[in-house]
Amino acid sequence: MKIMVCGKGGVGKTALTVLAARILSERFKVYVVDSDESNMLLPTFLGVSPPKPLVEYVGGKKDEEEFERMEPDITKALAKAKEGVRFDLLPSEYVSVSDEGIGLVVIGKVREYGEGCACPFNILTKILLGNLALEKDEIVLVDTDAGVEHAGRKLEEVCDGLITVVDPTLESLELALMLREIALNLNKKFWVIANKVEGESESLLKKEAERVGLKIDETVRFDQRLFLSCLRRKPLEADIALADLKVTPKNLNIAP
């Protein structure tokens, strides 16, 4: 099963992706695809060394038009198995594995001034997910870039479901409504996780979500330990957030 983790910037997509991967790894083989071209910290939070960006495996970053023309060649380069792309057949330097057995694949990052847009990275993500061959016990979580770039590139077409993370802001709810409409039109599974809520903000967020007809499937409270481990540039540590998210696999029914 391939699940995109979406939302506006700052809602906690990366942190929840890491925590959800840890929970799911107790029952499944989990891979995380880092499709965020700006945030460099996912390997740190997962507790692994950064793998080589997958874009290097297919010849490096090209401009958007050239990347699109190269799609057949890129697909051929990635698909080392007859049935399609398999993470376990990629060279080991492109997949880092955590102590929990979680595999991490990084698409690519914008790191140089003037190097151009991130469009080729989204094209590569779509090629990867669209040709990915998974076993029944494998789950892929895709940590997407902030906002709606992935929707513009139609990445939702090559996933099985979307988890949209919202925080106590109206902007996050508006984006969730847009993504829900996309998921419904594509017949994809859709869930909403409210993150970093506490006190009055939780009740107000739920009230506004109900007013606009948005169902919140799971609520994760603000976790000071998680916040501090992020600031300390350490593998993520969590108490409250992990406890709140612990029921997610059952409640959201995201098993393959």
Image (tube, grey):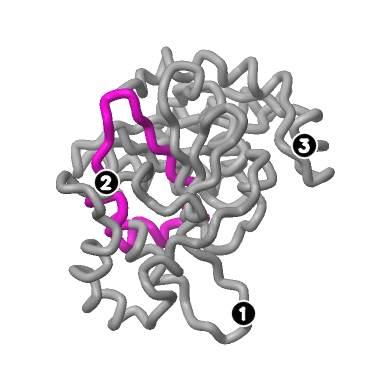
Label 3 sits on a secondary structure element that is: helix
Q: Is residue 171 left or right of residue 43?
A: left
In the figure, 67 relative to 163: above or below?
below
- At x 43%, y 44%, the residue is 142
Q: Indicate yes or no whether the magenta region holds residue 79.
A: no
Of residue 232 and residue 135, the one placed in the foreground of this image is 135
Q: Which residue is mark 1?
A: 112
Is there CB contact under 8 Å for labels 1 and 2?
A: no
Q: Is residue 199 left or right of residue 103?
A: right
Give the mark nearest the N terminus, 1 or 3. Answer: 1
Label 2, label 3: how far apart the Cα atoms are: 34 Å
In the image, is residue 140 part of the stretch drawn in magenta?
A: yes
- Could you tell which of marks 1 and 2 lies nearer the N-terminus? 1
**Mark 3, other Cα within 10 Å: few <14 / some 14–19 / many ≥20:** some
Residue 253 image position (x, y, % from top left): 35, 18
Q: Does the rendering let one see residue 157?
A: no
Amino acid at circle 1: Glu
Q: CA distance from mark 1 to mark 2?
A: 30 Å
Asked whether residue 29 is in view, the answer is yes
